[in-house]
Image (spheres, rainbow, N blue to C red):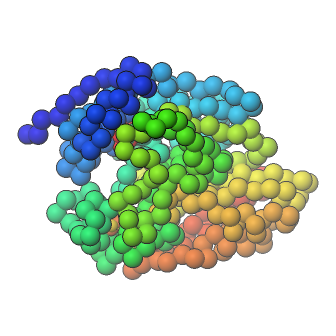
Amino acid sequence: MRPIDYTAAHDVKGALQTLAARPLDSAPIGGGTNLVDLMKIHVQNPALLVDINGLPLAEIQEVEGGLRIGALVRNSDLANHPLVRERYPVLSEALLAGASPQLRNMATVGGNILQRTRCAYFRDISQPCNKREPGSGCGAMEGFNRMHAVLGTSAQCIAANPSDMSVALAALDATVHVSGPQGERTVAFGDFHLLPGSTPERETVLRPGELITHVSLPASRFAARSRYLKVRDRASYAFALASAAVAIELDGKTIKDARVALGGVGTKPWRSAEAEKALIGQPADEVHFKAAAAAALKGAKPRAHNAFKVELARRTLVRVLALAAGLA
Ligand SMILES: Cc1cc2nc3c(=O)[nH]c(=O)nc-3n(C[C@H](O)[C@H](O)[C@H](O)COP(=O)(O)OP(=O)(O)OC[C@H]3O[C@@H](n4cnc5c(N)ncnc54)[C@H](O)[C@@H]3O)c2cc1C
Ligand code: SF4
């Protein structure tokens, strides 16, 4: 039995002070659906839990045509919010494709963005893992890597980012708002998660003691034409083998603008500028959807057990583009 200190914070300033007093061994807890899981298997071992559920960060507000989404908004509330369903269907669909209703009722926006990889070697402390223990090696590289990433991998780590919601946020040009001992700052969603490179233990630009306070979505021209499609081993309650979030703006049958992001295949939520370039200015048809899918997966580096993901991700993207364009 390992003793754990617990304290509940009631305002952001107080939470930051408590975290700053013990920067090395404290952790904020939102829904706890990832953190507590990892504590039970000794992968994460904070000695102080700072409960942030009492902070006033559970609101969804309309701001300048866009949305400000508090870090403590529950995944189910965000998925079912009328403005999200109407203006950002891709976000609602991505959230509803994740986990189970019970988990979504607990899981928060901040916690979902920061959830850790499901790599089985990361979650087993008897196995080597450069992410959990830098320099120890990588069990997945030559091991069972069926669920692992094919894009953004490094010689140190090939773990896939598991968050469905983050794929939609990447496509929607979201901004992450952060508060910390040095004040407040904003980070473009595409810059928030880091590629593993030679430091896979560093997953985001969040610094110790910082909190995500909210996420903002810009007013979007793509509102009505955004979709999420997830392919997985079971119809529900399973992580993505491949997923795609797209938003397109059509001018007649021509694609005027496009946003594309992939999930299940990248070491971070994978926005594909290459796929977007292949779509913009082209007719919305299967030929150009296939060209975009080929561009998105061009740099893929499959391993022994996950080569199937390359074709699966291509087909997922083609299909969801057809759905967004109203052709399927
Ligand atoms: C069985 C199972 C199936 C699942 N299936 C899916 C799935 O298909 N798709 C999917 O996307 N997800 C899935 N999930 C993951 C689930 O979505 C996450 O566990 C959840 O979103 C995490 O949110 P939370 O609020 O519970 O985070 P917590 O567990 O509370 O926190 C996660 C991490 O974020 C930190 N943190 C939390 N909030 C903040 C904040 N505001 N600022 C700074 N740090 C913070 C914590 O310290 C911790 O390190 C599944 C989970 C389980 C257990
Ligand atoms: S893929 Fe990454 S998370 Fe998984 S064992 Fe290798 S280093 Fe660890």
Q: Position of residue 263 (x, y in %)?
A: 53, 58
Ligand 2 is located in which of the four quadrants?
bottom left
Q: Which residue is found at the position 75% from the left and 56% from the top? A: 258
Position of the N terminus, as image quadrant, is top left
Q: Which residue is found at the position 70% from the left and 40% from the top? A: 218
In front here: 98 or 40?
A: 40
Above or below, 146 relative to 249: below
Q: In the picture provided, is 143 more to the left or to the right than 90?
A: left
Q: Position of residue 161 (x, y in %)?
A: 45, 57
Above or below, 319 relative to 55: below
Position of the C terminus, as image quadrant, is bottom right
In front here: 96 or 6?
A: 6
Is residue 237 visible in this depiction of the protein? no
Q: Position of residue 150 (x, y in %)?
A: 49, 71
In front here: 52 or 86?
A: 52
Above or below, 32 relative to 162: above
Q: In the picture provided, is 189 more to the left or to the right than 28?
A: right
Q: Which residue is found at the position 12% from the left and 35% from the top? A: 3
Q: Which residue is found at the position 28% from the left and 33% from the top? A: 21
